[in-house]
Image: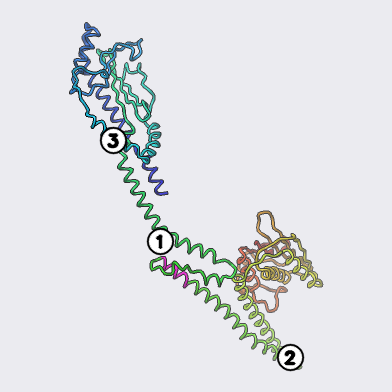
Amino acid sequence: MFLIALWVLFFVTDDFVENDILNKKNDLQLKASFMGKIARPAFENNKVSDFQLMLEMYDLFDDPQLLPVHKIKIYRYEDKTDIGKGFVYYNGTYPIKRSSISVTPLEAIGSQGQNNKWYDWDIMGTLFSYYRKLSDARVVMAPIVSKRSKFNPQYHVIKSGENTYDIRVLAPIKVNRKTVALIEVWEDYDLKNAYFSRNSLRVAFLIGISFITLVFGLALAFSIAFPLRRLSKRLNRKLTPSDLADQMTNMSVTRLASRKDEIGLLHNNLTKLTKQIIRLFRDKEQFAADVSHELKNPIASIIAHVENNLETENSNKNSGLLKIKNQALRMNKLVSDISEAAIVDHEIVAKKREKFDISNIVDEIAKHYIDEIRNSKIEINVTLQKNINFNGLPDRIAQILINLIENAISFSHPNGTINILLVRRWRKPLTLVVEDSGPGVPENMQELIFERFFTSRSGHSVVKNSSGLGLFMCREIVEAHGGKIHVETSQLGGAKFVVSL
């Protein structure tokens, strides 16, 4: 893009020809004014015939040292006669008798022909073909209207050939404020010669800059841009949800590891970072497993010991033991949920996704809970679109629905209602909705309920041994599948959980 902009700037900003033609036009106007002043005294004598005036004009302008006058004409001005058809007092295009004759040797002619060989340079010729069109649009104008020259000088720049312009000035010669003659001065402007003489060095310089820029650009591309692109592609290809740990282990690029510059340092630092992430990931999983194993056995022993002692008839003692048992059960559930959360963290990033029919999973889970709460006077309504295929983790998607349904049941009043909706619209994400007729979620808590260990249960909605991890795990699973979950107020009066996948 830089090189293209450079060449465009070269063409658009080059106004040399325009300024050169303007300067030549001004020179021609000065020449016409000067020649008119020289010729005016001859026209002041009314008794002189046209033939005598013509001889006097040739006597005046026959000196080649005066001015180059081979492109000057002087006409008699007549209102009813077109310019060029009247009497011509002087025509500089004809040979002048007293002018010196110059002989050009054949060798010089041959050398002049050789000087034009550089016009055939393809690059310059191509550039000139574009520049000629641009120049025509800038400088070419309408031809002179000769009758207007009676009062003021007129000029024009028109095309006289494929690569030449005709620069012409027509000025009046006045005697006592009356136009008696017109002086015409012109010059042929060789656009091609002017363009090549000015721009051959500039184009060569521009080509050199372009070549150097291209070389440096390729050097930077091969040394920096391409290696970074390879590293970026490796990161994008490897960091996928399936088998993440193994893929991150093989993330390094062999060619970059041996480099001693900043690119190699960046690669090595990224490799170290991924290894640390893998180690932390595995340490977290191992820690959760160790904690679960070490805590569950003592808790199980406490529960068993308490249950054995509850068989006695000492009511005061049984009341204390019952409290111990409830706390032990709560601790056991909390440890299980923490272990489950660690397993979920592992599966959502490391387990391979599979394609499955999510409609069947939702239907089976909904039927299970309909049978389970048949006697609780809570109604479950299911609206289900069939044959919706989804790519993900079936067990974890099922866990989302289970957690949301159990949450809705725990908050619903007797004779309450729970609605379950599964639908996928054209070019829209899959939508799973679970809403209930419970007390709902206050607006200031609609974000907090998805945080770890958060619970706001009270009254009849209190669930024994609730850990506050259910909705947190729902959010983690949904976001791992590239979706979103939020809660809003339901038309039933309770909470409405909306999952978009």
Report the span colored magenta: 263-272
The residue positioned farthest toward the right in the image shown: 375
Q: Main secondary structure of the magenta part?
A: helix
Residue 260 falls left or right of residue 398: left
Magenta-colored stretch includes residue 271? yes
Residue 258 magenta-drawn?
A: no
Q: Quadrant of residue 31?
A: top left
- Residue 332: x and y, percent? 66, 82
Tags 1 and 3 in contact by the CB under 8 Å rule?
no
Q: Nearer the viewer, residue 99 or 269?
A: 99
Where is residue 218 drawn, in percent x and y? 40, 56
Mark sitting earlier along the chain (1/3): 3
Q: Which label was assigned to residue 462?
A: none
Q: Which mark is residue 114?
A: 3
How far, Cα to Cα, is label 1 from label 3? Answer: 46 Å
Identity of the amino acid at label 1? Ser
Q: For the residue labelled by badge 2, is the local secondary structure a helix, a strand or a loop?
A: loop
Residue drawn at the location 35% of the way across and 37% of the way down: 120
Q: Which comes sooner in the sequence, label 2 or label 3?
A: 3
Graded by Cα atoms within 10 Å as few (under 14), some (14 to 19) or many (20 or more), the crowding at tag 2 reads some
Q: Residue at x 40, y 49 (%)?
A: 2
- Give percent across and percent down for residue 415: 79, 68
Residue bearing mark 1? 223
Distance in Å between CA atoms under marks 2 and 3:
121 Å
Could you say which disc has been placed on residue 310 in the image?
A: 2
* Residue 110: quarter of image: top left
Q: Secondary structure at mark 1?
A: helix
- Name the residue type under label 2: Leu
Alpha carbon distance from label 1 to label 2: 77 Å
Q: Is residue 443 above or below residue 129?
A: below
